[in-house]
Image (tube, helix red, strand yellow):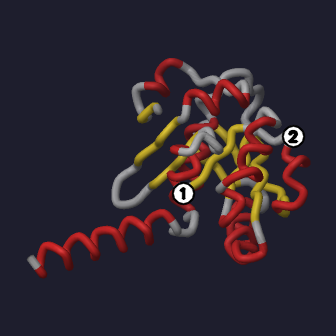
Amino acid sequence: MKLTLLSALAGSLFVAAAAQAETTQRDLEVIGRAVSFMQGGSGTDRTVAIVYDAASAAEAEALHALMSGGMSAGRVTLTSRLVPASDVASVSGADAAIMLGSAASGATATTATSQGVLTVSTDLACVQSGACVMGVQSSPAVRILLNRSAADTASVSFETAFSMMVEEL
């Protein structure tokens, strides 16, 4: 009984830690490949807004540095701009918005999604709640979760081949 309880507790801590994991370069590569499947994009350059709160500012800066000068990911090159959560309305015009920290929950993510932007987070709860369009996990294996209702709200659609690579809600 004690072993079962300890195993369950350890498993729940692992899941909680995974939900709070920082976005990595590999996550960015997966996001870039997903963006390349979006319909309506022209050219190969894609702008990614990095939406962050005070607690995730260092993570946002690190991601911004990875994309400085352009980061190749599949058929596209990602460039970024930093957007404080308090200025989320300015994500309009970006191809995607990576939601970090508390920006991946509630009103901030919902506002970004309503701006017609592909909202992405490594916190899958953002997708499960319908606030974000797409969730990405690249470790231990690649997992892409897509919320169809949020995608419709954002007017985001993907090539048919992409649907075979994702889990849809």
Q: Position of residue 99 (x, y in %)?
A: 68, 55
Regarding residue 77, the answer to whether it shows in the image is yes
Instruction: Identify the residue at horizontal 47%, vertical 33% (top origin).
Output: 169
Regarding residue 79, the answer to whether it shows in the image is no
The crowd level at tag 2 (other Cα within 10 Å; few <14, some 14-19, many 20+) is: some
Extreme residue toward the left, this view: 1
For the N terminus, which image quadrant? bottom left
- On screen, residue 92 versus residue 156, left or right, reads right
| Structural distance between the alpha carbons of marks 2 and 1 | 22 Å
What residue did someone put label 1 on?
123
Residue 64: which quarter of the image? bottom right
Up the image or down, 5 lies above or below 166; here it is: below
Instruction: Identify the residue at horizontal 28%, vertical 76% (top origin).
Output: 10
Q: Given the image, on which type of amino acid does mark 1 rest?
A: Asp
Labelled pair 2, 1 in contact (Cβ < 8 Å):
no
Between residue 70 and residue 114, name the one nearer to us: 114
What residue did someone put label 2 on?
92
Up the image or down, 140 lies above or below 41; here it is: below
Extreme residue toward the front, this view: 1
Dot 1: element? loop
Instruction: Identify the residue at horizontal 38%, vertical 65% (top origin).
Output: 15
Residue 12: which quarter of the image? bottom left
Q: Given the image, on which type of amino acid does mark 2 rest?
A: Ser
Q: Position of residue 52 (x, y in %)?
A: 75, 64
Which mark is nearer the camera, 2 or 1?
1
Between residue 154 and residue 1, name the one nearer to us: 1
Q: Position of residue 137 (x, y in %)?
A: 46, 54
Residue 148: which quarter of the image? top right
The crowd level at tag 1 (other Cα within 10 Å; few <14, some 14-19, many 20+) is: many
Dot 2: element? loop
